[in-house]
Every structure is written in structure tokens, then in C-alpha cells.
């Protein structure tokens, strides 16, 4: 019963407005390289109890059965956190929830799930696409793909996916399918991939701003915790810069601010994307005719002004350290060691080995806004989550559609509550404020069209911003965006032509 209640609470959270935003080729996970789609300021109407209940009810009839049907799903086996299947129950909440969602999906439809793994993370996207293509021309084709988020657009442009809107059983009004993700991913009234509760890694990959409560109290003796700034709408980039001051302490004995010293703020290049998104900026937008276009934010003064603030803060103020990369100088390790008052990271940082071994008392906040005039806190999504699609060559399309719908429901009903409990309550939920902050973070999630189609756009849409911040040069954004605008327009032209020709 407690699980059901929590699922209902999460359902309400998922109805909050989700914002969708829309690169030198390089890995988005290794910190070697730009992000953002349009953010709406229109508040979502409050859902009535009846609407919430209806949207949270399984719509797959108990009588719907596909006996002796095997649904074969190609999945990326190098996924960062367990999502697809586990061998058996072991008493661990997430493991057991994943096991039960598969059992209940199989029993509910009388099918057998056949998971076929292959490498498919950022560096192995080509392998995943090749395996999907090989399946499409085999005598026993795959029925569905469950791939790394950036792979879905490539599968689509290669004609390997089916329009999900062809199947009535796939009810995208349900809570387990985030409404604005579905809206943003629907192009020319067709939808070729989807995600939501069906991908447990989506919950892990939300960006938040963590803070060391003990260090904050020491530096800001007598002042209210930063939760107050969030509630007052004053948790902005300027406020982060302000409250990060005063924490620096030389610990490495080299008389130079360096990795290992204590700072007000630590981060690495991998996480620069969240500032662009958190400040409400986007690179791509969807035009009225369904085509993808460069956003007006691409050429406005706002990103230049933001970059100037960040460059001064990260490289000149002495209050922050941001010279590290994913392969070294871990900001999460420094936070776990008590050497950072603030850091930004995916919420699954709470599950890192260094964090589990840490005695740091910490809290969580949303990523700061650009200014007080920005109405909402916006949550950037990291790339390693799963997009699901139906294989165009599937010989079991109706059964596959029902499988995706029922599996998504059971993820919403079983897996999401377990994940929510682990990521929110492992350490920082000792205070009610942290639980509320988590809700705000989840309510502000957006999925960027520019990021979804990043591979098809030579990674221009996320790497430009990331590289501009890495350069620590305030004029870098204007220079790089101007230099790449024609390149991006050309890539968008080709992409739009391909999308328009899809069946």
C-alpha cells in the first residue's frame, strides 16, 4: 500500500511542467566537449484527483493475451545502472522491482521477454545501430530497441523504427510517459521513440546542486540554509557565486589554488551543460511545420552574459575549481571528502562509492536559475538513459506495443518508487526540505531536442557551450556559435529532409 501511495505522489510530480530544450564531435560523458529546446513559462493546471487516478491506471486489459509470443528486445548492455532485467530477487528493493516488472509484464500478456544485449553507450552507438540493422534483415528480427538516448534518433533516420502513434494501446496520456517529452519528440505527427518511467536511468540522470550542510553553516554562521533562496525564487547563478565565497582553504601546501584544496564550488567540464539549460536557454526549437530550427537563444546576448559570470567565477574568483575532466580531478570525490561547499552532478551521485563512504552531511537544491525573473527551476538530463522504440521489422507489432505499455506501467508502479526511495532517502532526505527540493528538481526536468538529435547534428548542439566554458574565455561563445551556425543549419536541413520522408 505504501508503494501505491508513493507511486501516486510521484504521478503528481510527473504532471508538473517538463521543459524541453534543444558540437565538435566528442563524448558527452567524458567531458571533452554544446545543449538546449524551448522552455515554457506557462504553469501546468493543477490535476484533480480524478485526473490523477485516471492517468495512473493501467490501460492494458487483463483479457489481452499473446500466448506463445516471444518479444525480443535489443538493449545496450553497458548501461550505467540496472534497468532491463535481473536474474532473480535478492532482497534489494530496486533489483526486486526490476525482476517483478518483467514477471508481471510476461504474465499479464502471456508473452516471453527475450533480452538481447550488445554494447551501445556513447562510444558504441555505431555497434548498436549495426546490430539493430542486422536484426531488421534477419529471419527473426528484433521487436524493440532499448538504447542509449542518443541512439534513438539514428535508428529513426535509418528507417529502423516504427511510428508508435499507429498503436492505440500505447496511451501516451498516462503518467509513465512524460507529456512534454512525447510532445517534443513528436515530429510531423509521428513518434518513433519514447522514454519515461520505463527507463529507470532517467531518474538517476537528473542534475541537482548538492551542498555540504556543515561547511555551509561554518562559512555562513547564523544565516538560513539555501533552501530559503529556492523558495523565494532567488536561487540564481549570482546567488550561487555569492554564497560560494569564503570557503577556500589551502590544503595541498603548494600555495596555488589547485585540485585538493577546499573551495566553495567544485565541478568538472562534463557538468557545464546544466548551467545553460538551468538558465532557460535552448539551441533548437520546433517550428510550426514540425521542422527543427536554431533557437533565437543561439544568437542573443544572454549566453554571453552567463558565460562572463561563469568564467569569472570558475577561473578568476578563487572560490571555485573547474579545471578537471571526467578522467581525473573528480568533483564528486572532493565533495565526498568535505572539500566542496557546493557541486553540481546527476542525482545518482548519491550512489557513488565515495559518497556512500562519506560522513558529509549534505543537502540538495535545483540547478540555479539565470535570475529571479526566470519563473521555474530547470533540470538538465544527462545522456545515459534509455530511449525505447519499436523495430520497423518486428513481426509482432501489436504485441510489442502492448508490451511497451504494460512494462512502462509496471516500471511506474514498482521500479520508480524503489528508485525514488533510494536516491532521495539514502542520505539527504533527513530533512523534509531535501525531499521538497527533490520534487522541484524532478518537476523541472526537460529533454532537449538538440540533445536527442545530437549524433545526427555532429554533436554541435551540446559541445559549443561546453567547449566555450572550458576555454574560460568570455568571448568564446559568440565566436564559436557564429563559426558553427552555417554548419548547424546545413545539418538541420539534411535532418529535416530525412524526417519529412519517413513513413
Image: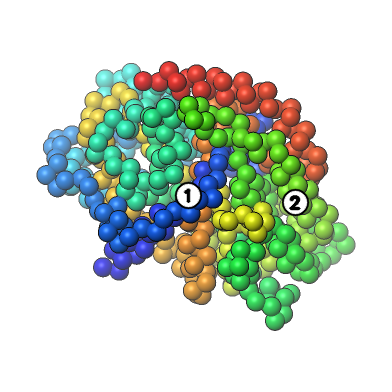
Question: 130 or 45, which lies in front?
Answer: 45
Q: Nearer the viewer, mark 2 or mark 1?
A: 1
**Mark 1 sits on what residue?**
18
Residue 403 position in % (x across, y down): 25, 40
Using the rendered view, name the quadrant where residue 331 is placed. bottom right
Check the image and name the residue furthest to the bottom. Answer: 222
Q: Who's the residue at 49% across and 30% down the image? A: 288
Residue 385 position in % (x across, y down): 46, 44
Question: 285 or 185, which lies in front?
Answer: 285
Q: Quadrant of the C terminus?
A: top left
Assign a secondary structure to mark 2: helix
- Say left or right for 38 vs 271: left
Q: Who's the residue at 56% across and 52% down the image? A: 378
Q: Is residue 350 above or below residue 125?
A: below
The structure's colour scheme is: rainbow
Assign a secondary structure to mark 1: loop
**Mark 2 sits on what residue?**
310
Q: Who's the residue at 61% across and 51% down the image? A: 278
Q: Who's the residue at 57% across and 68% down the image? A: 231
How many numbered discs, if any?
Answer: 2
- Say left or right for 492 vs 263: left
Q: Is residue 451 above or below residue 366?
A: above
Amino acid at each position: 500500500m505504501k508503494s501505491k501511495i508513493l507511486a501516486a505522489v510521484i504521478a503528481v510530480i510527473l504532471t508538473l511542467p517538463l521543459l524541453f530544450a534543444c558540437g565538435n564531435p566528442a563524448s558527452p560523458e567524458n567531458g571533452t566537449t554544446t545543449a538546449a529546446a524551448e522552455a515554457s513559462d506557462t504553469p501546468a493546471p493543477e490535476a484533480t484527483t480524478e485526473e490523477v487516478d485516471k492517468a495512473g491506471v493501467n490501460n492494458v486489459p487483463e483479457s489481452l493475451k499473446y500466448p506463445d509470443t516471444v518479444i525480443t528486445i535489443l538493449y545496450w548492455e553497458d548501461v550505467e545502472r540496472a534497468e532491463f532485467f535481473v536474474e532473480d530477487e535478492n532482497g534489494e528493493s530496486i533489483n526486486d522491482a526490476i525482476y517483478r516488472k518483467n514477471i508481471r509484464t510476461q504474465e499479464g500478456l502471456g508473452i516471453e521477454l527475450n533480452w538481447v544485449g550488445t554494447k551501445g553507450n556513447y562510444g558504441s552507438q555505431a555497434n548498436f545501430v549495426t546490430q539493430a540493422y542486422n536484426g531488421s534483415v534477419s529471419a527473426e528480427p528484433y521487436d524493440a530497441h532499448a538504447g542509449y538516448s542518443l541512439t534513438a534518433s539514428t535508428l529513426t533516420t535509418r528507417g529502423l523504427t516504427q511510428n508508435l502513434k499507429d498503436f492505440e494501446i500505447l496511451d501516451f496520456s498516462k503518467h509513465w510517459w512524460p507529456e512534454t517529452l512525447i510532445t517534443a519528440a513528436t515530429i510531423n505527427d509521428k513518434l518513433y521513440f519514447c522514454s519515461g518511467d520505463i527507463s529507470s536511468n532517467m531518474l538517476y540522470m537528473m542534475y541537482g546542486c548538492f551542498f555540504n550542510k556543515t561547511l555551509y553553516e561554518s562559512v555562513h554562521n547564523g544565516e538560513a540554509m539555501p533552501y530559503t533562496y529556492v523558495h523565494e525564487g532567488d536561487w540564481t547563478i549570482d546567488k550561487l557565486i555569492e554564497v560560494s565565497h569564503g570557503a577556500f582553504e589551502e590544503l595541498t601546501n603548494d600555495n596555488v589554488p589547485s585540485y585538493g584544496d577546499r573551495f566553495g564550488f567544485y565541478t568538472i567540464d562534463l557538468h557545464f551543460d546544466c548551467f545553460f539549460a538551468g538558465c532557460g536557454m535552448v539551441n533548437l526549437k520546433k517550428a510550426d511545420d514540425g521542422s527543427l530550427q536554431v533557437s533565437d537563444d543561439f544568437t542573443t546576448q544572454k549566453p554571453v552574459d552567463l558565460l562572463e559570470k561563469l568564467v569569472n567565477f570558475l577561473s578568476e574568483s578563487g572560490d571555485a575549481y573547474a579545471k578537471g575532466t571526467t578522467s581525473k580531478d573528480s568533483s564528486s570525490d572532493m565533495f565526498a571528502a568535505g572539500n566542496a561547499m557546493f557541486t553540481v552532478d546527476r542525482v545518482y551521485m548519491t550512489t557513488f562509492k565515495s559518497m556512500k563512504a562519506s560522513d558529509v552531511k549534505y543537502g540538495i537544491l535545483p540547478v540555479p536559475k539565470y535570475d529571479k525573473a526566470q519563473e521555474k527551476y530547470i533540470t538538465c538530463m544527462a545522456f545515459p538513459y534509455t530511449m525505447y522504440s519499436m523495430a520497423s521489422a518486428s513481426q509482432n507489432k501489436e504485441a510489442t506495443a502492448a508490451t511497451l505499455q504494460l512494462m512502462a506501467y509496471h516500471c511506474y508502479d514498482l521500479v520508480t518508487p524503489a528508485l525514488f526511495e533510494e536516491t532521495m532517502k539514502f542520505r539527504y532526505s533527513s530533512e523534509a526540505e531535501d525531499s521538497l527540493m527533490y520534487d522541484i528538481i524532478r518537476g523541472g526536468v526537460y529533454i532537449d531536442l538538440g540533445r536527442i538529435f545530437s549524433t545526427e547534428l555532429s554533436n554541435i548542439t551540446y559541445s559549443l557551450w561546453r567547449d566555450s566554458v572550458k576555454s574560460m574565455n568570455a568571448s568564446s561563445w559568440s565566436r564559436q556559435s557564429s563559426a558553427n551556425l552555417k554548419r548547424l543549419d546545413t545539418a538541420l536541413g539534411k535532418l529535416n529532409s530525412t524526417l519529412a520522408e519517413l513513413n
